[in-house]
Image (cartoon, grey):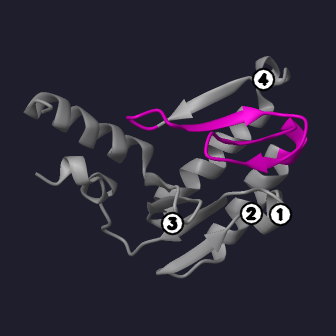
Amino acid sequence: MPSSAIDEATRRDWRGLGFYYERDDDSKTWRLLGTRDGLLGIAASLKAYAADENKKQESEHEHFGPYWYLEVGTWHTPEITEHWIAGPLESIDALASRVHTELIGAQPPATIRIRDMFAPSSPYEFQLEVQLEGFDPALADPQCRK
C-alpha cells in the first residue's frame, strides 16, 4: 500500500500534467480527462516532441504522467496501440495542431476522438474528454481518492 507521501506526490504529478489518463483494454481506448486548459498540455507536449531533433529515430519516445505508461513516440507510420501514440514527427506535429484547434472550439463536457484524424486503422482510440472548469485530474485516479 502506497504511503501518504507517495499518494501526495502522485496527486501533484497529475495536477502538474493537467489531465488524468487511463487505458481501457476492453474498449481499446486511451482516455485523457481534463479541463480545456489542462488538455491543451497534451497538444503542447506533442508539438514539443515533434520539434525535438533528438526524436527523429524510430522508437524514440517520451513517457507522461506519474505512472509513465502513456508514451508518445516516433514510428514510420501513425499508430495508436496499447503501448503508445506514435508516428513520423511531421504527423505528430500535424496532430498537435489539430488537437489544439479542436480543444479551443470544444465546449465542456465534450469528447474529441483522435484515431480517425491520426491513425484510422489503429486498434486503439485516443480520446480527450473535456471536463468543466474546476476538474481535478488527481481525483480521477482511483489511487488518489483516499
Locate residue 60 relative to residue 84 in the image: left or right.
right
**Residue type for callout 2:** Arg
**Residue type highlighted by circle 4:** Lys
Separation of marks 4 and 1 at Cα, in angstroms: 23 Å
User: Which residue in the protein does label 1 denote?
Assistant: 120
Percent of width and height locating residue 89 = 85, 36
Label 2 and label 1: CA atoms lie apart by 5 Å
Judging from the image, what secondary structure is the residue with disc 2 in? helix
Amino acid type at mark 1: Pro
Residue at numbered disc 2: 115
| Tag shown at residue 55 | 4
In this rendering, position of residue 88 left or right of residue 82: right
**How far from the left and from the top, in percent, is residue 45?**
63, 41
Which residue in the structure is indicated by mark 3?
A: 36
Check if mark 3's residue and mark 1's residue have beta carbons within 8 Å: no
Which range of residues does the magenta coloring cover? 65-91
Disc 1 residue crowd, few under 14, some 14–19, many 20+, Cα 10 Å:
some
Q: How packed is label 3: few (under 14 Cα within 10 Å), some, or many (20 or more)?
A: many
**Residue 48 lies in magenta, yes or no?**
no
